[in-house]
Amino acid sequence: MAVSPRSVTLDRWLKSLARRSRPRSPSRRSRVELGDFGRHRPSLDQDEASVYDALVRRFLRPRLATLAGPGLVLGVDAEPGWMDVLPAAADVKVGRMTGGFERELEATATVDWVVLDRCLQRMPEPTVALEEVVGRLKPGAALITLFTGIARAEPEGRRPLWSVAPYAARRLHEERRELERLEVEQHGNVALALAWLYWLPADDLTEQELATVDPAYPVLVGVTASRRGRRG
């Protein structure tokens, strides 16, 4: 006897209902689980243990040799939270982007490396801004550009104009013919994205949560490159 489609559908529905009614074992709670939020809007308080800063540290640690010699950090914070990953004796100038870019770029031509910390995505024309930076770099100087691929609610002075996907970051830099040794890397997953969006601290995240990369959730997009030519 043939089984009717209606009977098959009913059987699947009953099995699904039975699975849902089974008692579940208690899961480990963390501050990035959906049931833990308890609010509909994120806090806009400055996060002291930012998920972004934790990911930048992971990104920079294997590249610290690139950041030898005097360097320049241009970003949205007067003192980026991830700066503690740099050697204590590092000769670093820090400039905060305040809307313009010309004055902050004066030191670019005198350093061996430059880190652009989310400032390009706050510029109306990031292509023009990057071209200006690259044009001032010394031959052989290293360039590290950091983006957030997922935008979150920010106070007015910190709101980005753009969210940058990894392939867009690569294309932005590939168009600068003066650059070479270009690499693009991303960090993030759904748990980190939720923590970033809701301003939840990174302290409660496990090593596995920080290390897992899901291409669909690029919380951090990092680009490394260098200006063509030899260092003097």
Image (cartoon, rainbow, N blue to C red):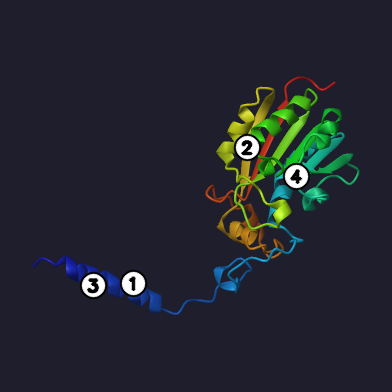
Q: Which element carries disc 1, helix, strand or loop? A: helix
Splitting the image into 4 quarters, where does residue 179 fall? top right
Q: Residue at x 23, y 68 (%)?
A: 9
Which of pointers 1 and 4 lies earlier in the amino acid sequence? 1
Q: CA distance from mark 1 to mark 3?
A: 10 Å
Residue on which the image places disc 1: 16
Across and down, in percent, residue 227 comes to 74, 25
Residue on which the image places disc 4: 61
Q: What amino acid type should be assigned to the residue bearing mark 4?
A: Arg
Q: What amino acid type should be assigned to the residue bearing mark 3?
A: Leu
Q: Please tell me how crowded label 2 is: few (under 14), some (14-19), or many (20+) other residues with Cα within 10 Å.
A: some
Mark 1 and 4 residues: CB-CB less than 8 Å, in contact? no
Q: Residue at x 80, y 37 (%)?
A: 67
Which of pointers 4 and 2 lies earlier in the amino acid sequence? 4
Label placed on residue 223: none
Q: What amino acid type should be assigned to the residue bearing mark 1?
A: Ser
Q: Which element carries disc 4, helix, strand or loop? A: helix
Q: What amino acid type should be assigned to the residue bearing mark 2?
A: Val
Q: CA distance from mark 4 to mark 2?
A: 15 Å
Q: CA distance from mark 4 to mark 3?
A: 56 Å
Residue on which the image places disc 3: 10
Which of pointers 3 and 2 lies earlier in the amino acid sequence? 3
Q: CA distance from mark 1 to mark 4?
A: 47 Å
Residue on which the image places disc 2: 184
Which label sits in the foreground, 4 or 3?
Answer: 3
Query: Which image quarter is the C terminus in?
Result: top right
Which of pointers 4 and 3 lies earlier in the amino acid sequence? 3
| 23 lies above or below 218 | below
Q: Which element carries disc 2, helix, strand or loop? A: strand
